[in-house]
Image: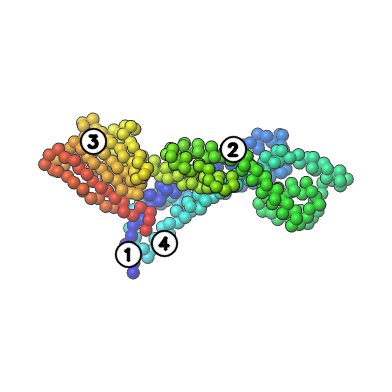
Amino acid sequence: MSRQVQVDYQQIAIQCNSVCEVARARLQELDDMIARIEASSSRIATEQVQQLAEAIRQERSLLDRQINNVSKKADADAQMGLVQMDDMEARYAHRNDTIKAAEQLQQTVDALASQRLMEFESLLEMLLKESIEDYQRKLREQSSGVVTVDSRTQTMLEGISDEVLRQFTYLAYLRDNALVGDKLLKAGELLMEQTVNQTYETRYEQERAKIRAELEASRVAPETVAKVTESAQGTAHEKLAAMRRSATVEIVGEKVRQKSLKIIMDAIRQRGFVVDKKNIKIKRDTNEVILVALKASGEKAEFRIFLDGKFIYDFHGYAGQACQKDIEPFMHDLEEVYGIHITKQTEIWSNPDKIATMKYQATNTNKNKK
C-alpha cells in the first residue's frame, strides 16, 4: 500500500554542499604537496619523485571529479525544493542518492587526510632523504656500468597498482637486489609500513594542531574542539584517523548550522529588522540559535532556530494583529526566496485586543528523512 510522503531536497543540498566545501580543503593540501615537489625539482629531479608527483595529480583529479559530481547533484536537488510524492515512485527510491554520494565523498576525504596524504608525505621525505643515486651507482658497479632489473622483478613492480607501494618496493630492491618475488614485495610493504608509522609518530602533534586549527576556523565550540582533539587510545595513526573523522562531522555540522542561520537572518533583515551580533546566542546543548531582532519603531522579534527544521518566533510590541504584516512576508520569503519550506504552522498564543505578543511555531516535519 502506497502513501504520500514529502522530501526536502533543499536541506539535502545544504548538507551535501557543506561536505563538498570540506573536501575542497583536501584538494588544496594536494596542490601544496605538488608545489613543494615542483619548487624543488632542480634538486630532486629523479624519476621516482616525478612519478610520485604524477600519482598525486591523479589523486587530485579523482577527488575533484567526485566533488563536482556531488556538487552538481546537490545543486539539482536544491532546485526541486520540497516535493510531494508517492512512496512507490521511482524518484522516491532514489531520494537519498545525493546523500549517499556525499557520504562516500566524506569517507574519501577522511581517508585522504588521515592515510593517503601521510603515505605521500612519507615517500616524498624518503626520496628526499635517501640517495637514490648512491644505490644506483653501487648497482652499476656490480653490473659493469648498467643498472638492470631482471624481467621477473620488473614485471612484478609494474604489476603494483599503488604508486606509493611500488616505489617503496623499488627502494627495498635498491637496498637489496637479491630479493625477488614475494620476498621483495613483503620487504616493500614492511619498508612502507615502518616509514609511514614513523611519519605518524613524528608528525602527530603537528597533525593534531592542524585538526584543531581547522575546527577553530570553522567556529566549532571550544569544548567540542577539546573533545575531538583529546588524545585517545591506540597508535598515532589510529588516534589521528579518529580525530579526523570526528572533526569532519563537526565541521560539516557547523557549516550547516551557519548556512541555516544566514538564511533566517537574511529573511529577517528583508523585513526591516536589525540584528546585532551580540544578540545572537548559540545553545549547543539543545542545538538551537537564539537571536533578538529589533526595528527602529520599537517592535521586537525573538527567534529560536532549531536545525531539525523548527523555528519559533516571538513578536513583541505590535498592536493587535499588526504583527501579521511582518510574519506573513517573512514566511513567504523563507519559502519563495530562500527555499525553506514550511510544512506545518501553529499559532501558539495571541491577544488581538491590545499590545500583543505573537508566538508562532513553524515546523518542517520532514527534512531529509523519510
Instruction: Give the Cα separation between the discs numbered 1 and 2.
Output: 52 Å
Q: Quadrant of the C terminus?
A: bottom left
Q: Tag 3's secondary structure?
A: strand
Residue type at mark 3 is Lys
Q: Quadrant of the N terminus?
A: bottom left
Assess disc 2: are there few (<14), some (14-19) or many (≥20) residues with their C-alpha within 10 Å of its C-alpha: few
Q: Is residue 100 above or below residue 229?
A: below
Q: Which residue is mark 2?
A: 32
- Mark 3 vs 1, N-terminal side: 1
Which label number is shown at residue 300? 3
Assess disc 1: are there few (<14), some (14-19) or many (≥20) residues with their C-alpha within 10 Å of its C-alpha: few
On the picture, is 52 further left or further right than 268?
right
Q: Are marks 1 and 2 in contact (CB under 8 Å)?
A: no
Q: Tag 4's secondary structure?
A: helix
Q: Which residue is mark 1?
A: 3
Q: Is residue 160 visible?
A: yes
Instruction: Give the Cα separation between the discs numbered 3 and 4.
Output: 44 Å
